[in-house]
Amino acid sequence: MPTLAALVTISTLSAQQPAPPTQNEELDVGQLFATTCGWCHSDGGRAAGKGPQLMDTKRDDEFIRNRIKHGKEGAMPAFGVVFSDAQIDEIIKYIRALKPHQG
Ligand code: HEC
């Protein structure tokens, strides 16, 4: 049974959810990552912050999906209510495509 605090957290997160992108409009994962994940996963996920570096992760897709959906108690919030599976797929692609800055 979810606690009241958990419910409040969930509704707060949902309220921050931007309008879902339309079919033609591509989800800007870089932007999403910077605003939603960037304060713990620094430099777009290229560097460690409060959370670990995500670039070059050795984790498999299932692990990453699971961590984004369910978070980790006391470490990372769960985003399963905020993002659809398709959006999480895009986030995983984004993480896989991360490269160090040029120059
Ligand atoms: C409040 C800080 C915080 C926020 C916000 C946050 N994370 Fe995390 N994240 C963490 C911490 C801390 C860990 C390490 C958890 C552990 O100990 O396994 C982590 C772990 C992860 C991992 C697993 C990395 C690994 O190698 O174990 C992924 C993937 C990840 N986060 C993605 C995201 C994404 C995507 C977002 C945004 C939707 C996000 N995180 C937002 C703190 C955060």
Image (cartoon, grey):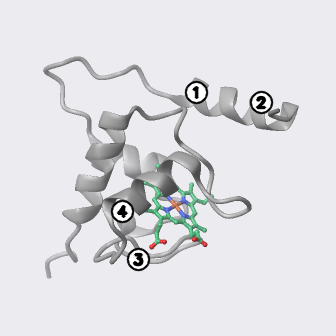
Q: Which residue is mark 1?
A: 14
Q: Position of residue 61 (x, y in %)?
A: 32, 59
Find residue 47 and name its label: 3
Q: Residue at x 53, y 42 (%)?
A: 79
Question: 10 Å neighbourhood of mark 4: few (<14), some, or many (≥20)?
Answer: many
Taking the spot 85% from the left edge, 35% from the top edge, the residue there is: 3
| Viewer-nearest of discs 1 and 4 | 1
- The residue mark sitting in front, 2 or 4, is 2
Counting residues from the N terminus, which is met first, the one under dot 2 or under dot 1? Answer: 2
Residue 100 position (above or below residue 94): below
Q: Residue 66, relative to residue 3: is it above or below?
A: below
Residue 103 relative to residue 28: left or right: left
Residue 44 shows which numbered tag? 4
Tell whether circle 3 marks a residue whose Cβ is less than 8 angstroms from ligand 1: no
> Horizontal and vertical percent for residue 36?
49, 47
Labels 1 and 3: the sequence-earlier one: 1
Give me the C-alpha separation between circle 3 and circle 2. 30 Å
Q: Is residue 16 above or below residue 30?
A: above
The answer to whether the residue bearing label 2 lies less than 8 angstroms from the nearest atom of ligand 1 is no
Q: Secondary structure at mark 2?
A: helix
Looking at the rendered structure, the kind of residue marked 2 is Val
Q: How far separated are the C-alphas under marks 2 and 4?
A: 27 Å
Q: Which mark is residue 8?
A: 2
Residue lying furthest right in this view? 4
